[in-house]
Amino acid sequence: MDVTVRLVDVSAMHPRLLWDTIITAAAAVLAGTQASPPFSIPLEIQNVPGFGDGELRLLLDPASVPEERLVRVRRTYEPSRLIELTAIAIAGIGLHLAGGHEILDVAVRGSAADYLVDEARHHLEIAGRSRRSDMETAWQQKWRRLEDAQEGGCYVCVAEFESPAGRLAFAD
Amino acid sequence: MSTAPALVSDMLVTVKSREVQRALLAEMRGDREAARRHFLASAHLELVLAADYEQAGDSLLSFRSQLSAASCFWRAGEREQAQRQIDNLRSAHPDQTEAIEQVQMELSRDYPPSAS
């Protein structure tokens, strides 16, 4: 299923968090890897509550992100950081579209998670990779880490920006 | 009709989350002074939240906020204060030893003394 989303709308999907830098980073990374907007990213969804299994093809519209902010974010953050921030945007959009989930908070360091989702405070781990070949390794690492520290349901979202492609899954 | 104020302010929780994000973004761009400032703000807000959660009868969220406060103090470079907080938590929550040890291990690994 194709879904067109404006990148700026992620801040309304998860209003408790700050999104300006993340949105700008995503616009910068996607503009650097795809010819023209909307930027397409197939997102595989696995076992996500309220959605189940399936695929969403995200068509991301960077409208409203000014060019000077793209230039500034590219100057300020290393490429690996920009990729990491872009993966956070993909996770946020995916969680909202697949079941209306909301990221509520940043997780405590050492809890094996990056963010907490919904009132249930499910753990969410996110990884971004620039190369397609690194995606499976990142996926396995994130799952192992969450399984070791499992306290209930958890989400993992990994995205790579060479193909590009992403995967978002939930496990009880 | 009485309208009792919520014991835990939603706005405070949001501000705290955003301060942690601002600290993390500052770390990412190598701005150590900004990271320290925002981690300190986060730590103090977590302490306020911990007390509010306790008053609201939610011990688990209170514990999480105290642990997060320790983590934020540590990342702000206030290691002694962080360590005191961790030691107090260890005494008060023996059932949470594993979670506390995990946080302490990651902080020691990722923020060694020489890094401050």
Image: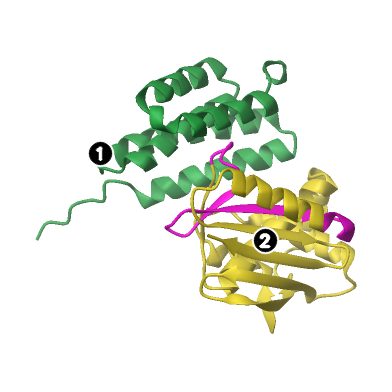
Q: Are marks 2 and 1 in contact (CB under 8 Å)?
A: no
Q: CA distance from mark 2 to mark 1?
A: 35 Å
Q: Residue at position x 36%, y 36% from top?
A: B50
Residue A121 position in % (x across, y down): 47, 53
Residue B82 appears in the picture as rendered: yes
- Helix, strand or loop at label 2? It is helix
Bin the neighbour count of mark 1 within 10 Å (Cα to Cα): few under 14, some 14-19, many 20 and up.
Answer: few
Give, as a three-letter code, the residue at label 1.
Gln
The chain that hosts pointer 2 is: A
Give, as a three-letter code, the residue at label 2.
Ala
Residue A29 in which image quadrant: bottom right
Residue that label 2 marks? A89
B76 to the left or right of A55? left
Residue at the far left: name it: B1
Q: Which residues are magenta?
A: A108-135
Q: Residue at position x 57%, y 61% from top?
A: A171
Q: Quadrant of the N terminus of chain A?
A: bottom right
Q: Residue at position x 61%, y 27% from top?
A: B105
A93 to the left or right of B3? right
Residue A37 position in % (x across, y down): 81, 75
Colour in which chain A is shown?
yellow
Disc sitting over residue B2 in the figure: none
Number of numbered discs: 2
Residue B114 position in % (x across, y down): 72, 16
Residue that label 1 marks? B55
- Helix, strand or loop at label 1? It is helix
Colour in which chain B is shown?
green
